Amino acid sequence: MPWIDITYRFPAGVDGSHEAHVIAVGQTAGTWGPEWENRSGQIKSHLAQVQDVVRQPDGTSLGVVRFPLSNCPEGIGSLLTMVYGKYSLSGPARIVKMVLPGGWGIPSRFGIEGIRRLTGVEDRPLFMGIFKPSLGLSPSDHSRILEEAGMAGLDIIKDDEILPDLPECSALERLRACRPVLEKILKFRKSRGLREMLYAINLSGRADTLLELARRLVAEGANALLLNVLPYGFPVLEALASDPLVQVPLFVHPAFSGAISGSRDWGLDHSVTLGTLASAAGADAVLIPTHYGSLPFSQEEEGKVRDILWQKGVFPVPSAGVHPGVLPRVMGDYGKQAILNAGTGIMDHPGGVAQGVQAFYEALARHMNQQSFFLEDLPEGPLRKAVRKWGA
Amino acid sequence: MPWIDITYRFPAGVDGSHEAHVIAVGQTAGTWGPEWENRSGQIKSHLAQVQDVVRQPDGTSLGVVRFPLSNCPEGIGSLLTMVYGKYSLSGPARIVKMVLPGGWGIPSRFGIEGIRRLTGVEDRPLFMGIFKPSLGLSPSDHSRILEEAGMAGLDIIKDDEILPDLPECSALERLRACRPVLEKILKFRKSRGLREMLYAINLSGRADTLLELARRLVAEGANALLLNVLPYGFPVLEALASDPLVQVPLFVHPAFSGAISGSRDWGLDHSVTLGTLASAAGADAVLIPTHYGSLPFSQEEEGKVRDILWQKGVFPVPSAGVHPGVLPRVMGDYGKQAILNAGTGIMDHPGGVAQGVQAFYEALARHMNQQSFFLEDLPEGPLRKAVRKWGA
């Protein structure tokens, strides 16, 4: 269907029906005078239509406005301008759902299937870590951490999202220091029937230099990339995901998401930005705060993002406050179709990075065997140390 | 000074002092264990410092956190990730001010001075219009409107911000239809001691195709461009403003600004996004909703954006609800250092587009002569028709 359906939530006290009509006209063709009578067929074809406005028990109203797809043939930049652009300045209204036509947007080139294929991990959740401390390490510090984590079985590692292309620890130098280690880890993984370990290098810079950096990194052997899609813009992700020279999985970080989704009455739901839009822009994996983690994120919202990503074959990456003791909860929500992402939950393990990784495997085995995670039931070893530190 | 000072406002009931420390550590180096003792000097050099947290009479608190410039050498994408990224997910806090070091960012290549030089308008505010209806016109419709408006003295015209690169009315075809008309208008303007009329063509697409489109348009004679900086991202503006092949004024539209600035407790003030960041990303002119216009925008916020733009030599473009009758108010706020931007306020003038433009000149003359704008005092003519329709 050549339509884009947007659901807006208007706060109590706002005439949702009126506002939906304001949006349908004001965010498309606008008004026109009799001098355009000869063009009116063409102009009218661009108008949006109010489908439905329903008052909710809490006084808010939900209005669905249907926009012609032809108003927005290109991508998310013009989509956001159309559905929320100038109207966003006119008063509180929140986009809680977007239904894009099948085939609209840029398909993930890897997604769940591709990341499983690259890493060779078939039948379990993947484990991902984050280089810590976030800033202040040298490229060789990165390579040392990588080696320890990778030889302990970590599947994926990423830069911290705030690590930019620092002169003393540039993205290219991090890659160069880590590339030989990734080879070594590959040999180890092959001996266990696995394939590559991925290192998602954080991208930064102006749009042009960022895209150039991505190509350069991939040309020199980067096997994954990380983008803070909200500060950089969905059009930057769309460019990466369309670039024939950037054929690696794209991991998307939700940094800055609260600026757009934090308020109840303004902006867009996380499920729209991190779910619908990130997957329509070609993300292969998207980090989602867990509802029991270090950030206040609701279970409902986490579930919505997850479901939208799954539908599009994109890997959800539960993050923030993930440590070995929460593995049963993560698997309760995601089963094996997730990438568990732990920063301090691996790097700050009392026994060191390798034990931080091992604790996750131990947790997985216990969970699969339906064994208890009570501290007193745990044998000495990495998992027990983790649960003693962070709980379960 | 090699620091970036960010002022956060924390809502009443939030321990601002605690939160400021969370930001200073969590958004920089994070924590690290004894195994990094040998790196601690380097790591500590990345920590931010809490400068000041002051409780306000309304219970909110204002906290200033000082970040090392060296954490963020590249631009606004990494700046936003650092100062608000993951923290934005942790609870309400709003950035109300950013102080960037002198020289940080990308200077405007035109700004007030350059746009005055290009257009030859020295001693008065500039007048700008918007092609209307927003969607549904053909390239030749654009050229007809342009001719009427330009020969009546309009200095600048822009596409509506929601007009993307439609197949039936592409940016390039709009330019090609309008370019000969701009030449004709140039001759007319020269005869009056002026120079070029500018046509700011709206950019859209993925980051890569947008940048390519901008180069193509400029190569074919475009003399200004328009960007919806918030949906596309500041890094896209930074790329345009750094591109040696895009040597034309960049007009920035605030579409989507409410998503980030609408709520009181989340996001960033308009003065930060439309003022500090737009000018640090190389904008030459920025559209600002007027406080008496069609959008609810406070006088204080409008004034803050204006002052920041002026400081950086960037042209403020008061917009939304601008018509001839409000000229005295606009000039009360901006004097002559503004570009008055009217969409329907020109295009829907009862006497047509040319009279829509003439009404602004008539308004300017009356205002300079301190004459009344009461309907009964106005002579027959374009201004009287405008004031009868829209008031004063």
Image (tube, coloured by chain):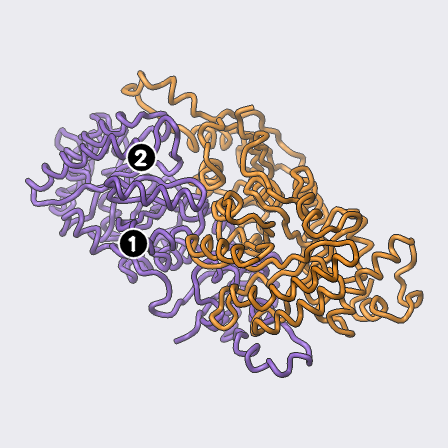
Chain colours: A purple, B orange
Q: Earlier in the sequence, mark 1 or mark 2?
A: 2
Residue type at tag 2: Leu
Q: Position of residue A126 (x, y in %)?
A: 20, 46
Residue B384 in which image quadrant = bottom right
In the rendered structure, the residue with mark 1 lies on which chain?
A
- Asked whether residue A22 is in view, the answer is no
User: Can you identify the residue that label 1 sits on?
Assistant: A244
Quadrant in the picture for the N terminus of chain B: top right
Residue B229 vertical placement versus B161 (above, below): above
Disc 1 to disc 2, C-alpha distance: 20 Å
Crowding at dot 1, Cα within 10 Å, few <14 / some 14-19 / many 20+, comes out as few
Crowding at dot 2, Cα within 10 Å, few <14 / some 14-19 / many 20+, comes out as many
Q: Position of residue A179 (x, y in %)?
A: 21, 35
Q: Position of residue A79 (x, y in %)?
A: 47, 62
Relative to A234, A342 lies left or right = left
Relative to B333, B242 lies left or right = left
User: Can you identify the residue that label 2 sits on?
Assistant: A172
Look at the numbered disc 1 and give the secondary structure of its residue: loop
